[in-house]
């Protein structure tokens, strides 16, 4: 696809390709050498960086930022306000092989990244897992299991190392309550689960 047509309200760089049919929201920007495949849906005010591939029938919410060199494969869903760091990796088949009947759509394992989550640079999300709301996956982590909301995980395999505020600051809990030192939001912890509370 060349320069964006005047009647559209999103931007596609002249080096990028958008296959039809696709749905792209107002204010979204698709940068150099990226490819959006047919049947995909991208929300409003998203940024799709350089050399990004969006697979067929992928659903991406509003205000999502996907940095350079990321492939979002069929079977992956990104909710609103998700951040995908540069060169992070999604997978969509648990047991891929070349030259066998695998890698068909019915083999794809669903991966969901919930609202506000951060996926750090060079991390890998093994398919079939859910990343909870506002979870924070550290750079280089290999996620092999579900990540709870607000959890901070890193390592190979990724393990919990605390919790993160919606603003991204690390939380410190005392008596199962925490107030973010950066933005002032309050949280409570019950076992391994954290939720935001209104004060």
Image: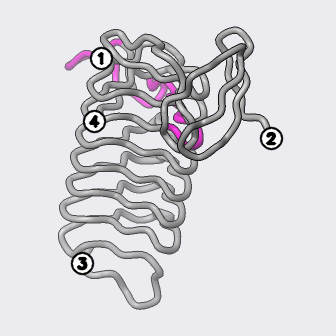
Q: Residue at x 59, y 42 (%)?
A: 115
Q: Verify CB contact (< 8 Å) between mark 2 and mark 1.
A: no
Give the mark nearest the N terminus, 3 or 2. Answer: 3
Give the CA distance from mark 4 to mark 2. Answer: 32 Å
Q: Which residue is mark 4?
A: 121
Q: Residues within 10 Å of mark 4 (few under 14, many from 20)?
A: many
Q: Is residue 96 magenta?
A: yes
Q: Residues within 10 Å of mark 1 (few under 14, many from 20)?
A: some
Q: Verify CB contact (< 8 Å) between mark 1 and mark 3.
A: no
Give the CA distance from mark 4 to mark 1. Answer: 24 Å
Give the mark nearest the N terminus, 1 or 3. Answer: 3
Q: Which residue is mark 3?
A: 2
Which mark is drawn over residue 96? 1
Give the CA distance from mark 2 to mark 1. Answer: 45 Å
Q: Verify CB contact (< 8 Å) between mark 3 and mark 2.
A: no
Q: Is residue 71 magenta?
A: no
Q: Residue at x 49, y 45 (%)?
A: 82
Give the CA distance from mark 1 to mark 3. Answer: 35 Å
Span of residues in magenta: 95-117
Q: Is residue 15 above or below residue 191?
A: below
Give the mark nearest the N terminus, 4 or 2. Answer: 4
Q: Which residue is mark 2?
A: 198
Q: Residues within 10 Å of mark 3 (few under 14, many from 20)?
A: few
The answer to which quarter of the image holds residue 187 is: top right
Q: Residue at x 49, y 37 (%)?
A: 169
Q: Verify CB contact (< 8 Å) between mark 4 and mark 3.
A: no
């Amino acid at each position: 696809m060349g320069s964006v047509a005047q009647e559209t309200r999103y931007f596609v760089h002249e080096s990028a390709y958008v296959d039809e049919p696709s749905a792209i929201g107002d204010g979204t920007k698709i940068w150099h050498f990226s490819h959006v495949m047919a049947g995909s849906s991208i929300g409003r005010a998203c940024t799709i960086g350089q050399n990004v591939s969006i697979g067929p029938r992928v659903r991406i919410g509003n205000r999502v930022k996907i940095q350079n060199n990321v492939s979002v494969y069929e079977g992956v869903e990104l909710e609103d306000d998700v951040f995908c760091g540069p060169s992070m990796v999604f997978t969509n088949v648990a047991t891929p092989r070349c030259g066998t009947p695998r890698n068909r759509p019915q083999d794809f394992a669903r991966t969901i990244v919930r609202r506000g989550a951060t996926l750090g640079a060079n991390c890998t999300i093994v398919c079939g897992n859910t990343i909870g709301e506002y979870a924070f996956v550290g750079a280089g982590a290999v996620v092999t299991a579900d990540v709870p909301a607000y959890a901070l995980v890193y390592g190979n395999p990724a393990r919990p190392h605390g919790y993160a505020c919606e603003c991204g600051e690390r939380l410190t809990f005392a008596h199962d309550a925490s107030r973010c030192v950066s933005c002032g939001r309050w949280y409570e912890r019950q076992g391994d689960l954290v939720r935001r509370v209104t004060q």
